[in-house]
């Protein structure tokens, strides 16, 4: 079977983005669906099995739409589109993925890159408390930060509070010299990086000095009532049950909370259950609380990150128990 797609309305940049460097994008499409793609003037001719041509054509149309909207298309994005088409979920990609979420201080427009991310953003918009669970690289913290900055700019809240438990990821940092800020900096650096991206260092410094933006360890939330604020608890898988209850009960009037974490990456001592896992289990059926579970399909880092996560997820129970494969 053969099908021809007319590309005459596309600019040369669209051709280059669709095909990719050394034709690597179009080769991925050919390999995925078992088709051949050949450019004949301004037409792209697809040939191959009758059942595969429509899917390949759908994937190409989706990619061309993305390119036409100025969205970057790389190998990771192409693989995501192919997976969604193969699973019959291509129609979902239009739902929420076109909506602008925020703009960084350098003018970069931030939009959801996956269906899961679009669902995550919609859940934050519709709930005062949102739990986001998922592996590394799914944008849990970054998108929550984007929503917090937008809420502040729109005067929906008066301040942003960012916190995370001070638990080392399998390492012992030992004694840290300096004042309080310098001591906790290693734990909070990922939050600073995201804030700098959206606000810029100068604006961040001014807002911090005025108390509009606060970044602090979780322990410093005790005894406070957090009103008129957008509060983000990052790396929540490392909270104990007591810490999680303490944090959640800090919520005041006109506030919004987002709790993010990866329950497969807990750094608590052996035998201690994650406060995040417990909270989601206890609270997921409360209508006013949103729970979003992102998956490896929502990873937006280097494409190898998806494969690494999948490799660890596919280990057998005995391998995980014995630490097999870990170094």
Image: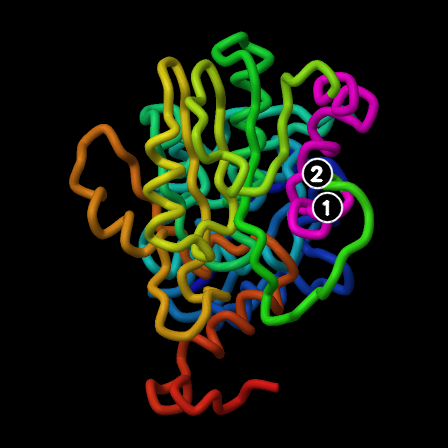
The image's mark for residue 13 is none
Q: Are marks 1 and 2 in contact (CB under 8 Å)?
A: yes
The x and y percentages for residue 39 are: 66, 56
Which residue is the site of mark 2?
192
Residue labelled with disc 1: 185
Q: Is residue 299 above or below residue 99?
A: below
For label 2, the crowd category at 10 Å Cα-Cα, with few meaning under 14, some 14 to 19 and many 20 or more, is: some
Coordinates of residue 284 in the picture (x, y in percent): 22, 43
> Measuring 57% from the left and 29% from the top, which residue is drawn there?
146
Q: Position of residue 166 (x, y in %)?
A: 58, 52
Whether residue 82 is visible here, answered yes or no, is yes
Residue 171 falls inside the magenta stretch? no
Residue range corresponding to the magenta coloring: 182-208
Find residue 25 and report its horizontal and vertical position in percent: 64, 60
Q: Choose the circle earlier in sequence order: 1 or 2.
A: 1
Q: Secondary structure at mark 2?
A: helix
What is the magenta segment's predominant secondary structure?
helix
Q: Nearer the viewer, mark 1 or mark 2?
A: 1
């Amino acid at each position: 079977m053969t099908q021809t797609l007319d590309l005459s309305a596309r600019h040369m940049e669209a051709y280059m983005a669709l095909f990719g460097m050394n034709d690597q994008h179009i080769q991925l499409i050919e390999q995925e669906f078992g088709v051949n793609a050949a450019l004949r003037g301004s037409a792209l001719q697809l040939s191959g099995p009758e059942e595969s041509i429509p899917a390949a054509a759908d994937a190409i149309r989706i990619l061309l739409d993305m390119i036409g909207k100025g969205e970057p298309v790389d190998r990771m994005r192409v693989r995501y589109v192919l997976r969604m088409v193969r699973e019959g979920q291509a129609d979902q990609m239009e739902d929420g993925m076109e909506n602008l979420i925020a703009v960084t201080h350098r003018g970069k427009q931030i939009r959801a890159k996956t269906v899961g991310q679009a669902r995550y953003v919609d859940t934050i918009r519709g709930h005062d408390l949102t739990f986001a669970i998922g592996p590394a690289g799914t944008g849990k913290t970054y998108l929550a930060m984007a929503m917090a900055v937008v809420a502040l700019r729109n005067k929906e809240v008066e301040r942003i509070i960012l916190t995370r438990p001070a638990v080392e990821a399998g390492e012992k940092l030992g004694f840290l010299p300096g004042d309080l800020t310098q001591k906790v900096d290693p734990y909070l650096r990922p939050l600073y990086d995201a804030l700098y991206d959206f606000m810029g260092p100068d604006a961040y410094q001014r807002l911090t000095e005025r108390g509009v933006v606060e970044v602090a360890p979780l322990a410093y939330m005790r005894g406070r009532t957090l009103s008129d604020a957008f509060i983000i608890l990052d790396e929540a898988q490392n909270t104990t049950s007591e810490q999680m209850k303490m944090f959640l009960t800090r919520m005041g009037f006109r506030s919004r909370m987002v709790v993010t974490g990866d329950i497969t990456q807990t750094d608590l001592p052996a035998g201690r259950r994650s406060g995040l896992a417990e909270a989601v289990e206890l609270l997921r059926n409360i209508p006013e609380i949103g729970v979003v579970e992102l998956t490896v399909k929502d990873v937006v880092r280097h494409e190898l990150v998806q494969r690494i996560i999948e490799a660890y997820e596919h280990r057998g129970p005995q391998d995980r128990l014995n630490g097999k494969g870990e170094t």
